[in-house]
Image (cartoon, helix red, strand yellow):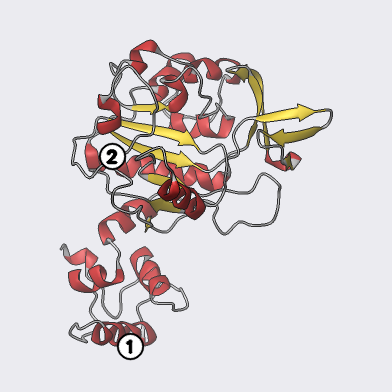
Amino acid sequence: MQSKYVLKKGHSGDLVEALQEALGLRVDGVFGPMTANKVKSFQIDNGLKGDSVVGPMTWKKLGLSPHELEADTDVTTGATWIEQYPLPEGEYVKQETAKEWIFIHHTAGRHNPYKVIDQWGRDQRGRIGTHYVIGGLPASGKDESKYDGRILQAFKDEYWGYHLGKTKSGKMHRGSISIEVCSAGRLDRVGDKYYTWYKSEVDPSQVCTLEIPYKGRQYFHRYSEKQIESLKALLILLSEKHGINLQIGVVSNLKEINEIKPNYAGNIESKNSSTCFEFDDNACSGKIKGLLTHGQVRKDKDDMQPQDELVRMLLSL
């Protein structure tokens, strides 16, 4: 392990903050006497040498990867690290495969990422699920932000699960990394009120209204700022780890219709953005390898919606 990932008294920064949070300490980012004593106690309790130096074995006992922590905290995100919340073995395909695609979905349901993965574990349809789930805010507007932007990993990147349904290329299941963003999905408007597809009323603050409908839908549950920040951090991490080109797919579609300047200022032609998320026969057949949405390979799916904030993030990659 590189020396920058070995922490000891006197060090400071993001990795120290993650260490302190994992140990249940007050987070100030400074490796002082209290942090050193807590590390020493943790090491002794876990059968390690109590030297207060956080090296490879201590990181492993903490269940953290400093490489991932650094990659994640290099980008502003609502999540400090990726939390492991594994599906039971047998609920995904434990076969290592090379990765050529990243697919982004939304759940069209729960905002709690733990319950999403729990549901997959009980699903009777087979090994259905995505590698990652990003928590969100409830469509009801209830003040429950503890899950917002939190990233959970259900199984290793190298393994795979069924997340695309019927497509023209079965290889995409095996060769892709999949991400679910927690969202209630498409909404129905009745008078001046909005409802989820499962008939729950939606707070107006949680409504995304598209100027041009996407796949016949104009109203969706809004992706939160923290979700979009966490998604960006995760995409960058996965792209660097697996060599997947984020510029191919939905991003290249967007850049074709938007005026891109060296210092992108965030101006988007929202009227045209919906077309970039539409079904694409070449994407469905596996000919386009890069970053894609579920809706680009399924005519009957409308995730992800072309929300302006999401479009801006994708254009910034």
In terms of image quadrants, where is residue 7? bottom left
Distance CA(mark 2)–CA(mark 1): 41 Å
Q: Of marks 2 and 1, which one's residue comes earlier in the chain?
A: 1
* Count of marks placed on residues: 2
Please give the name of the residue rendered at 44% of the width and 79% of the height, measured from the top-left corner. Answer: 25
Task: Classify the position of the C terminus by image quarter.
Answer: top left
Q: Residue 37, which numbered label?
A: 1
Please name the amino acid that badge 2 sits on.
Trp
Task: Classify the position of the N terminus by image quarter.
Answer: bottom left
Look at mark 2 in the image and give the residue it sits on.
160
Judge whether residue 27 can be spotted in this image: yes
Q: From the viewer's perspective, is residue 82 above or below residue 42?
A: above
Q: Nearer the viewer, residue 254 or 13?
A: 254
Q: Secondary structure at mark 2?
A: loop
Report the side of 161 relative to 142 (left or right): left
Q: Position of residue 144 (x, y in %)?
A: 64, 57
Which residue is outermost to the left? 1
